[in-house]
Image (cartoon, rainbow, N blue to C red):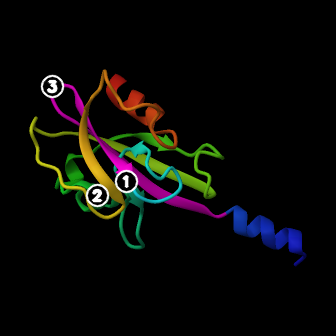
Amino acid sequence: MTGHETKTAETSEIRHTADVVVLTPDGDVLLIERDWPPYKGAWALPGGHVDPGESSREAAARELEEETGVRVSADDLREIGTWDQPGRDPRGRYSTDAYAVIVPAGTQITAGDDARIARWWPLNNLPGQPAFDHADILRAAVSA
């Protein structure tokens, strides 16, 4: 194998993630402030890597609880779609399955894991441009 073939093999690996749009009936969305690069300090949807042996739906529920303290059943997550555009993540090729769930207004949250802060935001007053392509995912969740 030449050096070029090795590089191509390394960069063509696709990593699998899952993200969650958590909404309240009164129009708030749960975002986390990222505590790690890329997009350190930016607001994002809760989510992360799918671990070996779990489905993306299970990963979404797990990541939501790890990053925000919000516990939902994987069965309660409604699939929104898959985002897999090349270049959507500066770390390499990532494909994410996105889910949505509605929780009661006033649901308690606690930042943890990769989240510096977890906070409810009104959908009509978001804190700037979310990290990655999470604005697209959020738009799809709200319009569905």
Quarter of the rendering occupied by the C terminus: top left
Q: Is residue 51 left or right of residue 122?
A: right
Vertical relation: 12 (above or below) 100: below
Q: Secondary structure at mark 1?
A: strand
Which of marks 1 and 2 precedes in the sequence? 1
Residue occupying the point 36% across, 48% down: 33
Q: In front: 88, or 55?
A: 88
Q: CA distance from mark 2 to mark 1?
A: 8 Å
Q: Does 70 lie within the magenta span?
A: no
Q: Does 27 lie within the magenta span?
A: yes
Which of marks 3 and 1 precedes in the sequence? 3
Quarter of the rendering occupied by the N terminus: bottom right
The amino acid pointed to by label 2 is: Glu
Give the dominant element type of the magenta stretch: helix, strand or loop: strand
* Residue placed under numbered mark 1 in the picture: 47
Determine which quarter of the picture holds residue 125. top left
Q: Secondary structure at mark 2?
A: helix
Q: Which residues are magenta?
A: 13-33
Q: In front: 56, or 43?
A: 43
Residue 28 x, y percent position in the rendering: 22, 31
Residue 52 x, y percent position in the rendering: 42, 73
* Residue placed under numbered mark 2 in the picture: 67
Determine which quarter of the picture holds residue 92. bottom right
Q: Secondary structure at mark 3?
A: loop
Which of marks 2 and 3 precedes in the sequence? 3
Q: CA distance from mark 3 to mark 2?
A: 22 Å
* Dot label at residue 20: none
* Residue placed under numbered mark 3 in the picture: 26
Residue occupying the point 88% across, 74% down: 3
Residue occupying the point 29% across, 51% down: 117
**Mark 2 near mark 1, Cβ–Cβ under 8 Å?**
yes
The amino acid pointed to by label 1 is: Gly
